[in-house]
Amino acid sequence: MPWNIGGLTSVSPRARRITALCTMKAGQLTSVTCYHCGDPCADDHRQRDGHDFCCQGCEVVYDLLNEAGLCDYYTLGQKPGVKQRASVDEQRSELFALAEVRERIVEFSEEGITRVRFSVPQMHCSSCIWLLENLHRIDKAVIRSRVSFADKELSVTFRESQLPLSGLVELLRRIGYGPQLTNTAKGRGAGVVPHMLYIRLGVAGFIFGNTMLLSFPEYLGADNEAGLKVGFQWLIVLFSFPVVFFLSTDFFRSAWAGIRSRTVNIDIPIALGIVALWTRSLWDVISGAGPGYFDSLAGLLFFLLIGRWYQAYTYRALRFDRALEDFLPLVVILKRGDVEEPVKVDRLRPGDRIIVRDQELVPVDAVLREGVAHIDNSFITGEPLALRRDPGDTIKAGGRQRGAAIELEVIRPFGESRLKRLWAEQAAVGERPAMPRMIDGVARRFTIAVLLISVGAALYWWGKDSTQVWPVVTSVLIVACPCALALSMPFAYGHTIRLLGKRGLFLRDAEVVERMAHVDMVVFDKTGTLTAREAHEVAWRGRALTPEEASGIRSIARNSAHPLSAVVHHHLKGPLLPTTEVRDVAGQGVMGTVEGRSVRVGSAAFCGVGPVPRASGEAIVHVAMEGEVIGHFLIRKRARGGIEDATSRLRETMHLALLTGDDQVDESLRDLFEVGDMRVGCSPTDKTRYVMEQQEQGRRILMVGDGLNDAGALAQSDVGITVTETSAALTPASDAILDADAIADLPHFLRLTRRARRIVIASLAISLCYNVVGVSVAVAGHMTPLIAAILMPLSSVSVVGFVSLAVWLAARSGTKAAMPRTGPALELQGRINV
């Protein structure tokens, strides 16, 4: 107990020991960090399962993950979690029930299944992505969740009957990822640079100009007036506060996020350079040692923000998927009166009538006008259950028809469709290709090396000339920028995607370019891929068909997207009759009921008859009515134009193989492949097994098919390309979609991807050379921080310019060697170029 003598307070030895013990205990306590988020544990320190937590929020998140068996999350990084913090609208989950809010964030809602898209700016690393894409393990009502890290967006498909939208919002908030209503996909304009960046640029330019103006007396040696000199210096100090505490906040936030997640990012050395330059300059002015480097600091931030603007503008302005409707070669059947004709989806306008057959995707939002639809929304929701839709019902883009052909009225053009985004979300979540992993590793190690070099430079100049320590350290931290490393691959592959799209090949994402560059074997499907859908000659063998029978066969064949069914449909004449119980069996045929009579159109086994002898190049489609085979169509087809030249060029650099479900290979194709590389009578399972066998031998497989009977092989291959003449081609199994008229350019496409990879490697070498030279000059003390800040964005500009020019030249040289394009493909290319 303290005791008082003569106004002096004394403390007993026991009290001093208790105070010291408490102080030591408090120090130990604050040195303990939270198992979830990594923040120090202070007043609200708590423990569970032997782990320390800084607050109830982090403990609750841990409990959630533990109950769901998701504690593997903590093995992805040190303290990977996001700390829960109170938000202004934290208690306002009811906002998400408002109709206008639902309209902004809900993309699909039918039969109790809802798909929403949120803006989640809190995500910052791979641990965040892992947790957000495993929401289904936390709550069983969640069917699927996918992250778009570049846009900081999260799409969630869930059963709203089990988990209301407000409950989903609350779940996200409980794990530290509360969604925001702003910047949602519908409310954000593509290609817009953030408005705040322009404000910061304006402020930075104003401060930089005025700081330079106030520094002129110092530059010219006209600083004899002591009062004026001191006044100008303190005015410059005043200008430096918004430079550090407003203009630099994004760099500080990013650096702090990297430190908290135990990852090194590009903004850590930049933030250190800003702090070092400002504190040294402030000390110089306070101590009277000199004017400091505030002019360099203002210029540094101005040019750094110019670099940020350049990156933001380039990424937004060159969004390589923005002209999807021009590049994606999807075709749909447009109905005008009694005439049906194939058109590209970008030509569809509200009010148009389209025909969607069995297994085909609905490419746009539309209203069902004729027929009964059974829509499989697994492309949207992940649930394969087909839902019945009657005339007058709205059908969302991405639904797949199961059954008889239906007629739809377009209500929104393809440009407003979410089809491409749905397709992109089907991308495999396996290991990334080698190139992006290598660049990520180089960028991380590069930043660590820069920090070590700056420490070494500081020690060297401290012993030689202490006044040069801070300028040299800051110059090293600023000029050594891995931005160019990070930009090289996205821009090279992004430009490649755009150029391939103009030629008729649309890739799902940039990493497909990397995988295509490593392909050493191409496997082709035959029917609908190497052979044209249009028949060269069609003949009927069997008893004479009555007009009613011909109409019935035509009506059933119309419901299948298979090339041979399409030939039968176009060959026969007569009115289309109502069909029911239609079923398209992959690799076999299509069957259904027409006016009470069962009809089968397809293979011999499907129709219950033995094989019929046929000549090379012929295909046979059997017809059975009421269980009785009445004859067959003899179809002669020819290979697509340019196939012989394309396979000849491909054979120079890689292995080729042909798979077909037919019993023999057409004579026109037989000489294009080695005997041992042609497989006949293949079922869809056989095709998948063949691809797996080749991969086990170490081959990188490119599978080219039509997406109908080879979806498994497309999914199994390293790269799956679907040759399209219908909307059935857009399947989760395909990595790319190829215009049927552009298949002859496949050798050029593969050559361009290999050149793009070499361009990336060359740009990496240029970037590394720039950084080595820049760091060397900065360490030698021959570079000011201002010059370093100017060179930093220039390095990005030079790499982007080199990559863009090199890819353009590579595509141009390859185009001259490629076969001239004719027909619809030439028309498409001309329309795009115009």
Image (cartoon, rainbow, N blue to C red):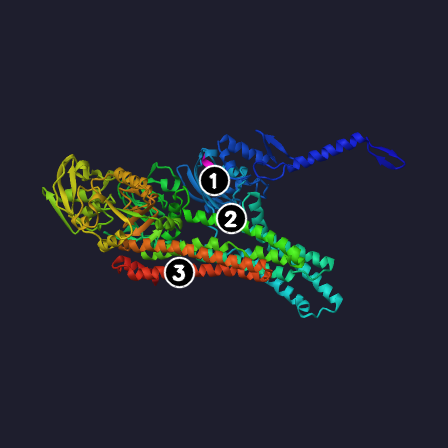
Residue 130: image tag = 1
In the image, residue 70 above or below residue 197 = above
Between the C-alphas of marks 2 and 1, the distance is 20 Å
**Which span is picked out in magenta?**
129-136
Q: How many labels does the image show?
A: 3
Report x, y in % for residue 193: 50, 56
- Pointer 1: residues within 10 angstroms few (<14), some, or many (20+)? some
Question: Which mark sits nearer the N-terminus, 1 or 3?
Answer: 1
Horizontally, residue 790 falls left or right of residue 667, namely right
**Which element carries disc 1, helix, strand or loop?**
helix
The amino acid beneath tag 3 is Ala
**Which element carries disc 3, helix, strand or loop?**
helix
- Disc nearest the viewer among 2 and 1: 2
Question: Which mark sits nearer the N-terminus, 2 or 3?
Answer: 2
The amino acid beneath tag 2 is Arg
Report x, y in % for residue 657: 25, 46
Tell me the residue that label 3 is attached to.
Answer: 806
Question: Which mark sits nearer the N-terminus, 2 or 1?
Answer: 1
Front in this rendered view, residue 22 or 597: 22
Residue 14 visible, this angle = yes
Check if residue 321 falls in the magenta segment: no
Report x, y in % for residue 734: 33, 45
